[in-house]
Image (tube, grey):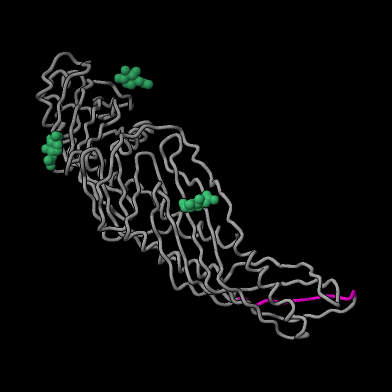
Amino acid sequence: MFLCCWLALGALIPATFSINPGVKVELTRKGLEYGRQLGMVSIQRKLKTIKIPDFSGSQSVAHIGKVRYSLSDMQIDNVQLPQSAVDLVPGNGVRLSISNAFISLHGNWRVKYLKIIKDSGSFDLKVSGLTITTTIATKSDETGRPVVSSVNCSATVNSATIKFHHGASWLYNLFKKFISKALRKAMEKKGEFYNIGKHQEPPFSPTAFSMPPEINNMLYIGLSAFTTNSAAFVYNKAGALSLYITDDMLPKSSPIRLNTRTFGIVIPQIAKLFPGLMMKLLVKTVKTPIITFEPSNVTVQATASVTAYAIQPNGTLTPLFVLNLDSSVSAQVFVSGMRLAGTVTLNNMELTLGTSYVGEFQVKALYSIFQMVLKVVVLPKLNAQLAKGYPLPTLGKMKLVNTQLQVLKDYMLIGTDVQFKD
Ligand SMILES: *[C@@H]1O[C@H](CO)[C@@H](O)[C@H](O)[C@H]1NC(C)=O
Ligand SMILES: *[C@@H]1O[C@H](CO)[C@@H](O)[C@H](O)[C@H]1NC(C)=O
Ligand SMILES: *[C@@H]1O[C@H](CO)[C@@H](O)[C@H](O)[C@H]1NC(C)=O
């Protein structure tokens, strides 16, 4: 029946689902209560704007014969929803119950009988003791993600009374009972089963993780290592993890410069073969960085190649050597606005020789140069990128407040209260 569908769709669904692979969202009792309050405000507002279809029929009346009637232009003018409750039902559904509701509406009536006699006026209908129960059920689809499987709704009406204005009183007295009954029936008609879409995304296999029973915040969002690793994968595929480093990116005060003179101190062949040239480095991840979550510790293992070039006077880049750089960084992760952001600091790094075009040399001797390059150029660049953040699942115009983030084994848990803006 008409009341049910938007009731179910209007307020509650957005607060229950918005799922990415490897992301779990759990609503607590506190969250449900907040959802109920919001839902009731929106239901009350929507009820007043609802369009009620015109209603017509005919009825045989003793001594008169067939009387045709119609009710039109019905408009809800008062809604009272004194009692409501939201519950989680077994099988991961959400149930909204409204009881003792009162709705009144105003409309126009029109009758025609004995072929030529017409009469019309207005009426007021009061529906009281209205009980509406809506259940939004969820199930897992083939990829393990929750989808809305059905919206089921029932309504019962305790009493519906109608008062006609204008017209012949014998007539509306005759009709009052009949029309009240018909309207009541129409309102109680069963809600249907709805199949609300289905996620058509490719299958995935996030690491299973279960969220601890938390209750202090309204909403808990779990992000598995899978999610952050797939974000890293996407960044890596997009080529976002490669960086050219030139001398102007080093601090002016640094005695270490990207030129063949500085590198010539450690590798004399460079100074000899390419005197007086500036240099350029290309740092490129060769594998997708691996992100691991341990309690209170996010670690990123990255393997990169570093190619050093001499810049010839005509602009040609002449490769000097390629190093393998394995590094481990620790990440501090936090929620900023609706995004998950972070900063990283270097734990340790290892350098090994990939290829040399300038003969043999001691890689160890380059360690402090590259540590400086990582600390003053690469990590600040990465941090600027990380500060932009990774979008959290958003549920409409939601603002997060009282947000806390914990790093646990294999996942991050964000507990938050939410505020919805109109
Ligand atoms: C509606 O939901 C209730 C509670 O889950 C259930 O008992 C009832 O059978 C459902 N009705 C339909 C038509 O599925
Ligand atoms: C986090 O773990 C890594 C790897 O086990 C370790 O190197 C690092 O020191 C740890 N950081 C903190 C803050 O415990
Ligand atoms: C640029 O200069 C280098 C070194 O002198 C030379 O080997 C190369 O052929 C030059 N390239 C072009 C395009 O002129």
Residue occupying image coordinates x 23% and y 30%:
302
**Farthest top residue in view:** 359
Residue occupying image coordinates x 65% and y 67%:
52
Pinpoint residue 149: horizontal percent, then vertical percent.
50, 45
Q: Nearer the viewer, residue 356 or 58?
A: 58
Tell me the quarter of the picture where residue 33 sits: bottom left
Q: Which residues are magenta?
A: 105-115
Quadrant for the N terminus in the image: bottom right
Magenta stretch mostly in which secondary structure?
strand
The reply, left or right, for residue 60 in relation to residue 243 is: right
Pinpoint residue 358: horizontal percent, then vertical percent.
19, 16
**Image: 184 above or below 411:** below
Residue occupying image coordinates x 50% and y 72%:
101
Pinpoint residue 146: horizontal percent, then vertical percent.
43, 43
Does 112 appear in magenta? yes
Does 353 appear in magenta? no
Quadrant for the C terminus in the image: bottom left
Q: Is residue 151 visible?
A: no
Q: Nearer the viewer, residue 55 or 338?
A: 55
Q: Is residue 61 visible?
A: yes
Tell me the quarter of the picture where residue 377 sits: top left
**Image: 85 above or below 117:** above
